[in-house]
Image (cartoon, rainbow, N blue to C red):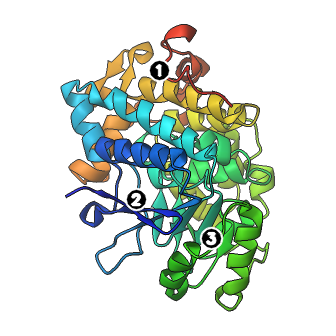
Amino acid sequence: MSHVQVGVEKNTGRITLNRPQALNALSLQMIRDLTVALVNFQNDPQIQAITIRSQSKTGPFGILSAGGDIRFFHQAALSGNPALEDFFTEEYTLNHLIHHYSKPYIAFMDGLVMGGGMGITQGAFCRIITEQTKMAMPETLIGLFPDVGGGYFLSRCPGAIGEYLALTGQLLTGAEPLSVGLADWAVQSTSLPDLWNAVADINWTDSSKGLQQLKQQFTTHTMSSTTSHGAWYDPRIETIFSLPDVNSIVHALSSRTDEWVQRCLQQLQQRSPLMLCVVLEQIRIGRSLNLAQNLQMERDMVRHCFYSEHLGRWGKASETVEGIRALAVDKDHKPQWNPTQLSEVTSSMVDSFFVSPWPHDAHPLRHLQN
């Protein structure tokens, strides 16, 4: 059975992720199926809009996607499977397609939305969340970085919030993503079936008017769009996470003892010191790049994560493979990071992640245009 169900209702293309046993984690085949479906819908003059949701164990909404298939990453890296290269090239191409999609693409983000799930929703015309939404880019926990365009959409969060979310992997729940620009509309989860059906009754030839009409129909189900942040937020984010390097951030946190600071320190101490430094650089470089440039940079970075020739490490010796092992394979939650301390991370280690392993005319994402 396909893990991507595709259909048509009236003028609307329907996509449902159907891999609930794996929390709708994206496989290479799912990425390919999504790409084919979106290209076909884009080329079909009868289709005015597209909706995407996921099948959970309890019904047609729920966990949108917990991310990419990290167990596949681990196996492929250890065996030298070339499909690992294809995965990221094709996933980032799909992310780019969604950001530049020519028709309204409406994402229903109920439940977990992480990693690869963010990649197939952040470029949507309308990003719908509910009180059950749990959103994060937690890649630093596995020795990776917030990819799928994370350098683009996180760096465009207000102030230093992008740095904070990228480094800590902090979870945003309920309507909280509205306040940082990572969602557009919060509704009650009980309204999702009716909302899903209502999309097909809208005339989407004028997308702005179509969305306005849809929102008017569901005014009573709309959650507050207040700009206030949730309990995760502390105004010190702006001063601490805008400091020049990770050492400075940790030092500033270490001089305080309150609950928020202790949570931040605990989050950072679980992460790879090397990848924390890489991620801070990614977000700050990403702020000045367009989407295509960000994805091309991230394609370079992810190659270095699994094949760290510049560090003399690859396979099980890489930070990413070790991080996945500790979290999802052996599940001992005791990654052996290398280096073990922030003080041991050098600028040359970090800078090498941003040097492309390919000449410009051979880059796997050279075809992307902004």
Q: Of residues 21 and 30, which is closer to you in this image?
A: 30
Tell which residue pokes out farthest to the bottom in this image. Answer: 220
Viewer-proximal residue, 249 or 296?
296
Q: Which residue is mark 2?
A: 66
Q: Is residue 51 left or right of residue 254?
A: left
Q: Quadrant of the C terminus?
A: top right
Q: CA distance from mark 2 to mark 1?
A: 26 Å
Which residue lies under the disc numbered 3? 259
User: In the rendered image of this protein, does residue 116 appear above or below residue 195?
Assistant: above
Q: Position of residue 368 (x, y in %)?
A: 59, 27
Q: Secondary structure at mark 1?
A: loop
Left or right of 26 on screen, residue 153: right
| Residue displayed at 59% across by 63% down | 262
51, above or below 67, in the image: below
Q: Secondary structure at mark 2?
A: loop
Tell me which amino acid carries mark 1.
Pro
